[in-house]
Amino acid sequence: MEQAKKVALIDADSLTYIVAWNHKDSIPSLVAQSCDSLVNSILEKTGATHYFGSFSSDKNFRHDIYKVAPYKGNRPPKPDWVREWERWIKDHLVRKWNFIEPASLEADDVIAHLALASSPLEECVICSPDKDMKQVPGLHYDYKVTENGIIEVSTQQAEKNFWLQMLTGDDTDNLKGVPGIGEVKAEKLLKGLDAFDMHMAVYEAYCKYYGDYYGDIIYKETESCIQLMGPTHTFYPAAAKYLDSIKELGFYPVPKETQDWPEI
């Protein structure tokens, strides 16, 4: 009989910044130790028996479909300490921990797909500081705020989190949402609504601000950018085969001791 697994699904993008920030003027051996220590801490805090880690590709489909503003176009240049260590950190985590760098997808998409496609014998914990991941129901662990521990996001709350972000947008990714609607107004607009009515309320808010013609277009572009890759995503049929190939890689067992892993 197949044994139950507790799987840490690690959104690895922020790991690069955490390690690079702490080792601005360091040496490779200490950076490697920091990478391993941080991954081991995530695995320990989540009680994982297995894990899977993913970075984001440099460019993905969202850059091509969002026309309102350049996707992620408001981000400043990466600091020198990130540029210096980013490639080295990624290579280390790919080679030693089997993390992946997917083609044309963000880490969020890969992690969301793996969580949604998990079997009843796979209890997944999404490990990420990114609020985008809160649109996926289940267990979540923010490795930047370790004292908060693991929280559970219900299906209803996950649905609401998505529609809230559709209204407010995402400054980090330069997604505009509906200008003039912040968190307070968004909460008020969606209060007490079921999934269908939240959908309609958000769509109407786009059409009210942008007009019926452009409201429909901008709504669809924004939805495709904010929604993570799952069976209901517009582009899921095109990505399904590739995502399934990632799923087929399987989850990696957590090593009993760090020294069980070969040095590189």
Image: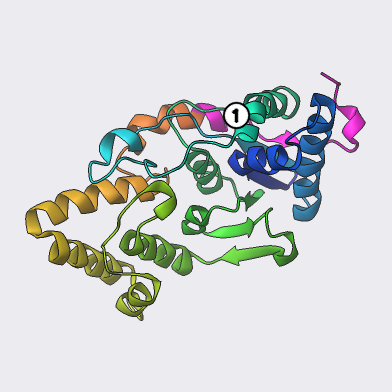
Residue 121: image x %, image y %?
66, 48
Left or right, residue 229 beside residue 38 = left
**Three-letter amino acid code of the residue under disc 1:** Arg
Residue at 69%, 42% in the rendered image: 21
Left or right, residue 179 beside residue 32 = left
Specify the quadrant that holds the N terminus: top right
Residue at 27%, 41% in the rendered image: 66
* Residue 12 is at least partly visible in this image: yes
| Foreground residue among 6 and 29 | 29
- Identify whether 179 is placed above or below 227: below
Find the magenta span and give its range. Answer: 245-264
Specify the quadrant that holds the C terminus: top right
- Identify whether 204 is placed above or below 190: above
Residue 245: image x %, image y %?
51, 26
- Identify whether 212 is placed above or below 33: below
Residue 247 within the segment the image draws in magenta: yes
Residue at the spot of label 1: 83
